[in-house]
Amino acid sequence: MKEYEKRVYSQQGEDGIIEHIFSNIGTTNKVAVEFGVAANSHGGIPGGESNTLNLANQGWQVYWFDGEMISNPPKNCNFTKAFLTPDNICNVFEKAEIPKDFDLLSIDVDGNDYHLREKLYEYNPRVVIMEYNGSYDGATEYIMPRNDDYRWRGDRLFGASLKSMTIQADRMGYDLVYCDQNGVNAFYIKKDINPFPVKTSEEAWIKLIWTR
């Protein structure tokens, strides 16, 4: 899939991969949910390096969440200021009226990503993008202990390894299909709709670019 990587707004070419995936599986309600977008504001555009701004510009309904405020979010972006924890995430989703079934979920909070995903078992995104900790190889299991006060400090102890995220995804009914060439994001698709070859974490793993 690497030939489909393309940046419109996204940091790692995710826009092109998202486009390719949905051109093959189609869309349903064109709802996308993304955590951790404030830090990705760029060029004066809120969320200007997010994975979902391009979708909002194509008419999708996008829900953004971040602990930092975003003023004047772009059209079709419904922003909620909330520091998400495993204890509050489902209540925050309910208040935002996010449907149980939707097209895309993207999680990038540089910390409790694995633990937040674990709590969303009642929600059924068709595609999930998870930032993984690519400093651990594809055969290594690592999950950062839950820490609701954690802020990334530039170390290698954040998030979870690709192996651990893929075990979690498989248990929740998702196939790993791709990791971007900078070793940042993993793409998962629901097993019952996935048209792509399934990858093991060892096959898909790309080393995190800033640890090479």
Image (cartoon, rainbow, N blue to C red):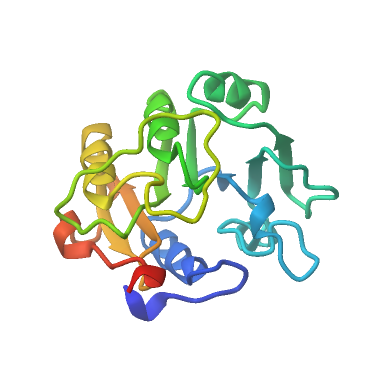
The image position of residue 83, as x and y in percent, is 63, 32
Residue 179 shown left or right of residue 90 in the figure: left
- Residue 191 position (above or below residue 24): above
Residue 136 visible from this viewpoint: yes
**Count of residue discs:** 0
Quick one: 79 or 183, which is closer to the camera?
A: 183
- Looking at the picture, tell me which residue is in the foreground, 133 or 58: 133
Q: Quick check: 138 left or right of 101?
A: left
Say which quarter of the image contains residue 84. top right
- Nearest the viewer among 104 and 87 is 87
In the image, farthest residue toward the bottom? 3
Quarter that holds the C terminus: bottom left
Q: Can you say whether 39 is above or below 142 in the image?
A: below
Picture layout, residue 6 above or below residue 202? below
Visible residue check, residue 192? no
Q: Residue at x 25, y 57 (%)?
A: 195
Residue 69 drawn at (x, y percent): 77, 42
Residue 54: which quarter of the image? bottom right
Residue at 35 percent of width and 66 percent of height: 208
Position of the N terminus, as image quadrant, is: bottom left
* Residue 90 shown left or right of residue 197 in the figure: right
- Quadrant hosting residue 8: bottom right
Position of residue 203 measured from the top left corner of the image (x, y, whole percent): 16, 64
- Image spot of residue 189 (x, y percent): 32, 49
Tell me the residue at 64%/46% (across/down): 62
